Image: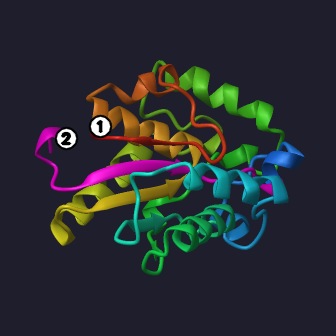
Amino acid sequence: MQKEVLKNRYYAFRHGESLANVEGIIVSDPAVGTLKYGLSETGRRQVRESIGKADEFDDQTLVVSSDFKRTAETAEIVREVLGAAPVVFDTRLRERFFGGWEGASHENYSQAWKKDAYDPDQVFNGAESTRSVRERMWAVVEALEKAHSNRKIILVSHGDPLMLLNTAFEGMDARRHRSLPYFKTAGWRLLNP
């Protein structure tokens, strides 16, 4: 599917600062992330400020989110500020699973990223491959294309998954996802201008 023929406009929105960000740990296991490590107070403020500055969204914008606590809380703030319909949750928007680094220091991300640059199918230390993440994220777009037309759709997710989705929109190899501008907490961008 080419981005030029998409029927909807897609926006990537990363969750606000989470308690896992504050603690500097990796929380990628759904058994943990869906129940714990929601937004910090700073994260809540970041999301309100970020969406409050966006003038292209309105109450007809569709908000689709990962079901992790930090993204669900982010999506609800976005929905509330916009006055939009209830958030739609899709597990395919979840965080990239980082395997053996679960609960470890966030400094360990770089070990997976170094390997990502050479092999989009690598599963070093049990981490989910970049190709797998990109495919599940793109599957969300394909499903939304079948269900909607002429909508603005905000996809609320996590840093790596959003960057990998961004590579699909740009027609880039998944191995190059770290070459794209990083998504700061509560950062967002239009994926198909």
Image point 31% across, 59% down: which residue? 152
Instruction: Using the rendered view, name the quadrant where residue 143 is placed.
Output: bottom left
- Residue in front for this viewpoint, 127 or 75: 75
Question: Marks 2 and 1: CB-CB under 8 Å?
Answer: yes
- Residue in front for this viewpoint, 39 or 51: 51
- Indicate yes or no whether the magenta region holds residue 18: yes
- Marks 2/1: CA–CA distance: 6 Å
Q: Residue 193, position in %: x, y? A: 27, 38
- Indicate yes or no whether the magenta region holds residue 148: no
Q: Residue 4, position in %: x, y? A: 14, 39
Disc 1 is placed on an element classified as helix
> Is residue 36 at all visible to an observer of this figure?
yes
Q: Residue 128, position in %: x, y? A: 53, 45
Disc 2 is placed on an element classified as helix
Amino acid tagged 1: Phe
Is 34 placed left or right of 115 in the picture?
Answer: right
Q: Residue lying farthest right?
A: 23
Is 34 placed left or right of 190 in the picture?
Answer: right
Q: Find the magenta span and give its range.
A: 1-19
Image point 68% across, 26% down: which residue? 110
Is 7 placed above or below 117 here? below
Residue bearing the label numbered 1: 169
Amino acid tagged 2: Lys
Is 134 placed above or below 56 here? above
Which badge, 2 or 1, comes first in the chain's sequence? 2
Quadrant holding the N terminus = top left
Image point 47% across, 37% down: which residue? 163
Mark 2 surroundings: few (<14), some (14-19) or many (≥20) residues within 10 A: some
Q: Residue 132, position in %: x, y? A: 40, 46
- Residue in front for this viewpoint, 7 or 30: 7
Residue bearing the label numbered 2: 3
